[in-house]
Image: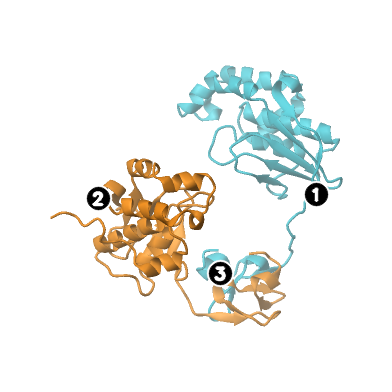
Amino acid sequence: MVEDTKRYRPPEWAFAFHGHLCPFMPLGYRMGMLALERLGVGREKDHTLHVIAELGEGHPQTCLLDGVQAATGATYGKVLMEKTYWGKLAATFWYPEKTPLRYSLKASFIEDFGRLAFFAHRQKGLEPSQIPEAVALEAIDWVFEQADDTVFEVTERWDFVYTPVKGSFGKAKCSVCGEYVFERYVRVRDGQAVCIPCSGYGK
Amino acid sequence: MLDRELLAFGQRFHGHVCPAMPMGLRAALAAMAKLGVERAPDGQLMALLELDEDHCATCFADGVQVATGCTLGKGNIKKLHYGKWGLTLIDKKTKRAVRVVPRAEAMQRSKESQFMQLRKSGVPASQVPAEVAAPLVEMVANAPDEALLKVGEVFEYDWHDAPHTFESVVCASCGEMTVTRNARVTSDGQVVCIPCSGYGK
């Protein structure tokens, strides 16, 4: 059966969430959907699936992670998305009782992709929303013509150990400013419970 | 020329004979001379070391501690984690600093030595034969400053120490003394230390 390379093209709402037309959000969306499919789980509603992304800051193509969030439900707000700051286009998808899966963009794909006009515009300093729609769509269309294994390298990470932080509802009121602070961030000053800013401790 | 007594003191503190600790002594002394300061009895000086962890020649840091009085225990020495041997010494009182760094050519000589071959093959420094280590130490001890180091110009540095605290509490769980700033509060309002809190930090 011929693979449908277009099956994980993002829906309109994912583009609206991300805010501009670029090919990396769709790449991340596709990555996230493939990971869910292979893990055999649905889009995360609550707090089970964790994504440990190898991207950093100060480099392009981090748009990938908005696609991953949109596809998987492993969002920043649910504290299910974290970054290792390694500057790599890869992410490991962790789900309890399942072998973690690492998806990375193949170097050969990145090189071929980089020849598209969209990237010439970006390198000249244009923001994605300043790039003509047709140029962005050309890049997105091209992504969805490539086979899954042309784009992604998938590795089963038997060695990947991850312990999610245990959550708690506990909170206390800061004796200085009167605002609520969640318990792991309560500090003590002069025998009183205070928040970090009011403590003066800085952390 | 390195004072022999200081070298011996440094070797005694450091624990073995190697060229990097004396290089630290030389860099520190050059920085102190440029700033016109004495060894710090308290926290008068601050040493910023460009060293990282788990790499060669971090022994440099012990030379800096011994010469400057900027020590781990006094909290006036810090690593910047650049994997380099630059030292910025700050005189807090006059808000002046200087950066001193060993010359790459000087370090290259140590790098190409038999001492280094032995170290790379896993021989601990204290087991390197004295006749192998001694020439390198002599080279570092005797070379003129200009051959060994690059000494920068003095610049203004308004260093601010982090706030110092004397407050402490007894952990309600393990009963050990804990700096209040580092104490945490559990769900049932107990003031405990970080390990006992389970919060990890």
Which residue is disc 1 drawn over? B158
Position of A91 compared to A2: left or right?
right
Residue B70 percent location from the top left of the image: 74, 43
Q: How many marks?
A: 3
Element under disc 2:
loop
Q: Which chain is orange?
A: A
Chain under label 1? Answer: B
Tag of residue B100: none
Would you name the residue on which mark 3 appears?
B174
Give whichever of A102, B176 is nearer the camera. A102
Q: Quadrant of residue B21?
A: top right
**Residue holding disc 2:** A147
From the image, which quarter does the C terminus of chain A lie in?
Answer: bottom right
Q: Disc 2 vs disc 1: which is toward the camera?
A: 2
Chain letter of disc 3 in the image = B
Give how far apart the Cα atoms at labels 3 and 2 are: 58 Å
Left or right: where B64 falls relative to A99: right
Of marks 1 and 3, the one in the foreground: 1
Colour scheme shown? by chain
Query: On the same chain: label 1 and label 3?
Result: yes
Hey, what amino acid is under mark 1? Asp
Q: Secondary structure at mark 1?
A: loop
Q: Nearer the viewer, residue A112 or A178?
A: A112
Q: Residue shown at 16%/54% (left/top)?
A: A2
B37, A31: nearer the viewer: A31
